[in-house]
Image: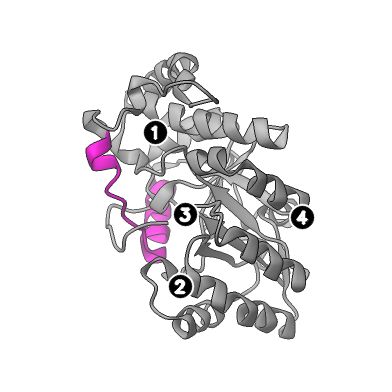
Amino acid sequence: MRRFTGLCVLGLALAAVVTVSRGAKPAGREPSILFNDKDKYWVSAKEMVHRSIPDLLEQHQSELRRGLAHAKLMRGNPDLREVAITFDDGPHPKYTPKILAILKQYNAKATFFVVGEMAEKYPYLVRAELAAGHSVGNHTYHHVDLTQIPPVYIAAELKACGQVLSRIGKKPPHLFRPPGGDYNDEVAQVAEALGYITVLWTNDPGDYASPGTDVIETRVIDKISNGSIILIHDGIRQTIDALPSILKYLQSQGYETVTVDQMLAHASQDSRTLGSKPTPPLARPASNRTGRRA
């Protein structure tokens, strides 16, 4: 009965999303009332939290016990010496150009999970990311905790960001990362129904808290392994300062830095699900909350 109810809720959300997503703020248009800052749902949804990697893995075990299989990726092929560096929360006019310059200098590829309202303000930066051969994914339109809003709002957030990225990049995005790693079955079902693969991570240095350049570098390097997905952020000065040393280390150890799209293409069935049997490297967040945001 729970499964049937969930599918009904999902169906209603997707049926309503065409109307709701008119609030995606194309140029010159006012956002839908569903995106109004005064709406009761946004008060709690904007209080961003952050899921730890143990939380992600614990929730994955819960999924396995319940026989669930969401389209998601947390780790690449463990047999390949490659790593995916991912940047959340951009684009930022001050920091994104510096990140792109460093990546170019080291001939490294990355994936940018961008916030729709930021992409709409700085579309030229998203175009620069795509032109350099990086992947660009959906990080919702407003960067909110999707578990704190109704399914119709979830669909609207993804649709709104997706529309912005489609206009900029000329094709729909298919990679999605929930802010903070916060999602539940409804979020995963809505994302998959809209054609997205949910991308999580294996390596989180907590750069959002600005713990220090050396700390960020050490935390990343200490957790590197085949198929790692590194979570760092676009608007953190210390992250940019640490990035050259991280890239030098990866190259010295024979790791190739790839986009999430490349990682998906190389991933074995041991490290991904695309709507089929979930496997241990993939995860969904648990009920514990730690940290602040992703």
Task: Identify the image quadrant of residue 31.
Answer: top left
Q: Nearer the viewer, mark 4 or mark 2?
A: 4
State yes or no: discs 4 and 2 in contact (Cβ < 8 Å): no
Can you identify the residue that label 2 sits on?
Answer: 205
Which residue position holds label 1?
186
Q: Earlier in the sequence, mark 3 or mark 4?
A: 4
**What kind of residue is marked 2?**
Pro
Determine whether 226 is above or below 260 in the image: below
Q: Secondary structure at mark 2?
A: loop
How packed is label 3: few (under 14 Cα within 10 Å), some, or many (20 or more)?
many
Q: From the viewer's perspective, is the residue at label 3 or at label 4 nearer?
A: 4
**Where residue 242 sits: x, y (%)?**
55, 78
Foreground tag (1 vs 4): 4
Q: CA distance from mark 4 to mark 2?
A: 25 Å
Question: Which of the two discs, 1 and 2, sits closer to the camera?
Answer: 2
Mark 3 residue element: loop
Q: Nearer the viewer, mark 3 or mark 2?
A: 2
275 above or below 209? above
Q: Position of residue 215 (x, y in %)?
A: 44, 83
Residue tagged 3: 283
Determine the residue positioned at 71% across, 32% down: 171
Q: Is residue 56 magenta?
A: yes
Which residue shows up at 39% across the image and 21% down it? 32
Look at the numbered discs 1 and 3 and tell me whether their residues touch, using CB distance below 8 Å.
no
The residue carrying mark 4 is 132
Instruction: Answer above or below: position of 141 versus 88.
Output: above
